[in-house]
Amino acid sequence: MSSPPTKTTKNKTTKTAPSRPRDHLSPEDHLEILKQLYLARYFDVRLIKEKRRGRLTGTLYSSHNQEAILVGTLFPLKPSDWISPIHRDMPAFFLKDMRSGWENPDRMGMSIEEVCAQVWCKVGSPGRARDNWSHIGSRAKHIIHSTSMLAGTIPVAAGVVLADRLNGGDAVVLTYNGEGSTAQGVFHEAINFAAVHKLPVITIVENNQWAFGTPLELGCPTPDVATRADGYGIPGLIADGQDVFDVYDKVMEAIEWARAGKGPSIIECKTFRAYGHGDHDDDRAAKYRPQDEVEKGRSRDPIAVCKRYLVERGYLSNADALAFAAENKGAQEAKDDDFPPDVVAYMKKGVDYAIASPSPPAEEGGMWVFSD
Amino acid sequence: MAATQEKTKKNYLTAIREALDEEMERNPDMICLGEDIGLLGGAFGVTEGLMSKFGTHRVYDMPISEAAIVGVGVGACLNGKTVMAEMQFIDFISCGFDQIVNNLATYHYRTAGEVAMPMVIRGPAGGYGGGALYHSQMNEAWFAHSPGIKVVCPSTPFDAKGLMKAALRDKNPVLYFELKQLYRWSAIDEVLPDEDYEVPIGKAAIRREGRDVTIITYGQNVYHCLDAAKKLEEDNIDAEVIDLRSLVPLDEAAIVQSLQKTSRAIVVNEAPRTCGFAGEIVARISETAFQYLDAPVLRVTRMDTPVPWAHSLERYVLPSVEKIAEAARSVCRF
């Protein structure tokens, strides 16, 4: 990025591309990224099955087909960086700082046990099951807690890094938003403020084309959400949301820009929502979205796209690529055998913990209204 | 005696400014956010001098973005700061409503105590000044109705300074309603202590002792009630005036204690009648002090209207000394 507003278009994956951020990743990193995609997918698949069996309460907002955005945005972060995930980003809570070791208790992300306890509405959740699903966070792990009011965490994120700068830190913050959230007034207020003060706020827009039942063109007057950045004089980048390495490259650019003190940016990741808005909406979504649009939107599974790239680059053998075939399968079709055993085992630990964790004691409902 | 007389009396606005200045000095992690609070020193001058003294990294002239003012404050609190957020007029707080009631107020609750939110949101409130619909509101009930926020409303310079200090040292969000008609009203100027002091949140003050009827109020209506009490002397009615100072938490004990003596009460408040805080006080009395009552508790509030502009209209809808005195006479006649 030379000077704002800079806009790049979709990156074609070519072998002759100049040095990109991804080119500095080790072969092990490349394989770890694929592993994390499997994990994010398996988490979602497992929850969809559990929900269908009636074992979970509340609404499941599936991240199926959007995993490359989560892994690609989180992998470039330093442990001390902040994030604010929203409803469709449930895997982000445990994917954050996974590079410090999946089992590392000191890593700056949640354990799978904590996240599963939250999904199962149990006291072992970091929020002790006081608010539902994605409405958890951790000050200690630098994860901002969201509410149901979309874009509402962007000003909070700006305040977090404002304070961090005053404390002499160099953290950046990634906020996650749907394309629908960008129509909120507070989206403008917060990014405007962040741009005025050149705060390191990176706004990720997961443009999955549908805000519940409303298509993009009824929520945004321009074909690209990223052009909203022009009004703030900040970079608005567009990433291929199915390609984890394109997301990684764009986020890395934005991080370097932000850490250099140049301010915020918006990264629009183009993707497609695989299922309904929430699981309550699956049946209706099949009616309000044209079937061919759904098929096209789901035709580039992020796991397949990643595998193809790893094979091309020689990080993954053809045989290893074929060993697990989770890609292009719906949640009901996918079986445990379609995922690496360590991914399945990791999730199992979380589920076992969640099931064993009790419900919160009733009297906690009246606690913590005020701090003593 | 001579020494005290030499000391300067200070007005309500100066008292607030001194509290902010002294807390900024005392707490290096405190920052201020608001519209026009830096270069200009605030629309009323409450924050005058803060930016030049503490710098642009602690005092922020914010864009006209109330939701961002509150939201940025929430983030700063999350990351270890204490925040004073100014609403240029308390009426404008509605633009930041979601951030206050859904984000700020609930943060401690939904994190099971992990996160505290030491933020004070303050702003000029109240009618009687010809400010019309959007510069006259008294909207404390919206926030008293949102669990997780403390609500205070001082009526004297001493309380203004002491409550501001207590609020800025509290770990919880505090909404601080200051009355713009009191800012520079010299009649209430007073000498403030040299030493550091706090007025505890949740404690009412008896402004006038009396035996016959308890008048419960807060904010600038305290002075209307004191004038009414004076008038009531002509009718041989000895009124007690309670200034609540804090609405959340509410000093129920002070109310009950007074009712044990007087057995009669009226509640006076310039906010609209329906679902106003006056109604809450009547409900609490009904629940905890019914046995002491000799008469129903009456309310004197604004009519259920906005605050209109023309003086005649504004006077018509707001509580007045006459309306208060008449309500007191009425409960005493019962």
Image (spheres, coloured by chain):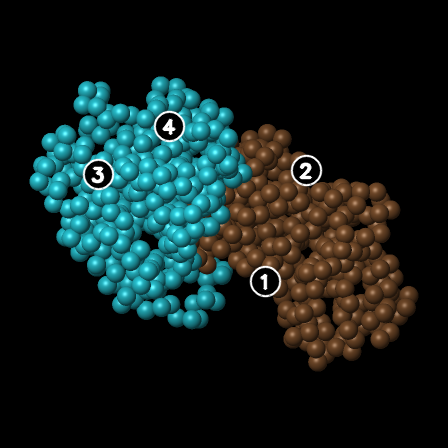
Mark nearer the viewer, 4 or 2: 4
Q: Residue at coordinates 17% horizontally, 45% vertically from top-left?
A: A325
Q: Amino acid at mark 4?
A: Leu
**Spatial distance from mark 3 to mark 4, Cα to Cα?**
24 Å
**Residue under mark 3: which chain is it in?**
A
Say if labels 3 and 1 share a chain. Answer: no
Mark 3 or 1, closer to the camera? 3
Q: Secondary structure at mark 3?
A: helix
* Other-residue count near label 3 (Cα within 10 Å), few / some / many at <14 / 14–19 / ≥20: some
How many numbered marks are there?
A: 4
Residues packed near mark 1 inside 10 Å, few (<14), some (14 to 19) or many (20 plus): some
Residue at which label 4 appears: A237
Q: Colour of chain B?
A: brown
| Residue A355 as seen in the image, left or right of residue A183 | left
Residue pointed to by mark 2 = B44
Are the residues flagged by discs 2 and 1 in contact, CB closer than 8 Å? no
Question: Is B211 left or right of A54, judged from the image as shown?
Answer: right
Q: Which chain is cyan?
A: A
Query: B228 or A365: which is nearer to us?
Result: A365
